[in-house]
């Protein structure tokens, strides 16, 4: 009882979601788990942990649990309102009086994923116009040309320059110049097909 009380206090002292299960059936969880999933404890206890994992990730979670792994891995869980939440999960097998059980720590990594997506976007896009940058274009152009050669087809590249752009910056200010570039980017995108690429190569 003292051990269980210590464990209870520990689970309530952390903001990370913690769930206990035996053979995949939830036996307990902390308040952070109910906040993460949106269910009250009565809706969780007795249910399979796999019911709360996005279907395309269930086989990965099942294999992780079945093999008794204890290294961190990532899956996607489903909130009660239907939202999908990327999480990092670490499971540990604990000895029990009647049978072993698993304690699982679930960490919401939405912010981490968003930061990674922003970094990936910035690496391949111009931050001002949101257009693909030179790196993106050269990679895409290589693919297009390779495909054109295989199909004995052709690909077209059009370079566009804005005349007197320096005059706009000098007379109206850089904010006006930036706004002009954003409008030009938007208009060019509206004038091409979905398969075409509009990119900004330089400053």
Image (spheres, rainbow, N blue to C red):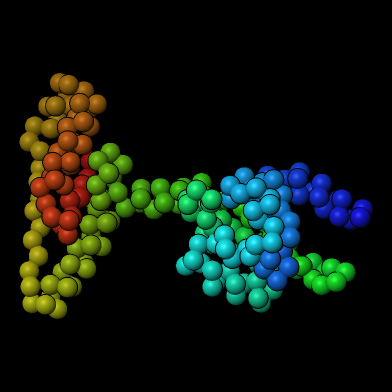
Identify the residue at image location x=46%, y=47%. Answer: 115
Between 48 and 149, the one nearer to me in the picture: 48
Q: Please, which residue is most extreme toward the top here?
A: 171
Q: Quadrant of the C terminus?
A: top left
| Residue displayed at 15% across by 69% down | 145
Residue toward you, 32 or 110: 32
- Residue 202 position in % (x across, y down): 22, 45
| Figure quadrant of residue 163 | top left
- Horizontal relation, residue 93 to residue 165: left or right: right
Snapshot quadrant of residue 190: top left
* Left or right: 175, with 75 as reference point: left
Q: In this view, does 28 lie above or below 191?
A: below
Q: Which residue is drawn at the image coordinates 83% and 69% (left, top)? A: 95
Residue 42 % position (x, y): 68, 52
Compared with residue 91, is residue 173 higher up or lower down, i.e. above or below?
A: above
Residue 105 at x, y = what percent? 68, 57
Q: Nearer the viewer, residue 178 or 44?
A: 44
């Amino acid at each position: 009882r003292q051990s269980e009380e210590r464990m209870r206090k520990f689970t309530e002292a952390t903001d990370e979601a913690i769930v206990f299960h035996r053979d995949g059936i939830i036996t307990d969880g902390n308040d952070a788990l109910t906040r993460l999933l949106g269910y009250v404890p009565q809706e969780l206890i007795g249910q399979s942990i796999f019911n709360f994992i996005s279907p395309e990730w269930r086989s990965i979670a099942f294999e992780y649990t079945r093999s008794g792994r204890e290294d961190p891995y990532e899956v996607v869980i489903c909130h009660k309102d239907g939202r999908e939440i990327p999480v990092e999960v670490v499971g540990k097998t604990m000895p029990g009086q009647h049978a072993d059980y698993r304690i699982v720590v679930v960490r919401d990594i939405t912010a981490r994923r968003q930061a990674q997506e922003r970094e990936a976007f910035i690496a391949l896009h111009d931050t001002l116009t949101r257009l693909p940058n030179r790196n993106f274009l050269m990679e895409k152009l290589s693919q297009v040309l390779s495909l054109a050669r295989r199909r004995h087809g052709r690909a077209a590249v059009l370079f566009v320059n804005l005349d007197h752009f320096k005059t706009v910056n000098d007379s109206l200010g850089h904010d006006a110049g930036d706004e002009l570039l954003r409008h030009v980017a938007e208009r060019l995108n509206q004038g091409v097909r979905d398969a075409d690429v509009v990119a900004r190569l330089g400053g």
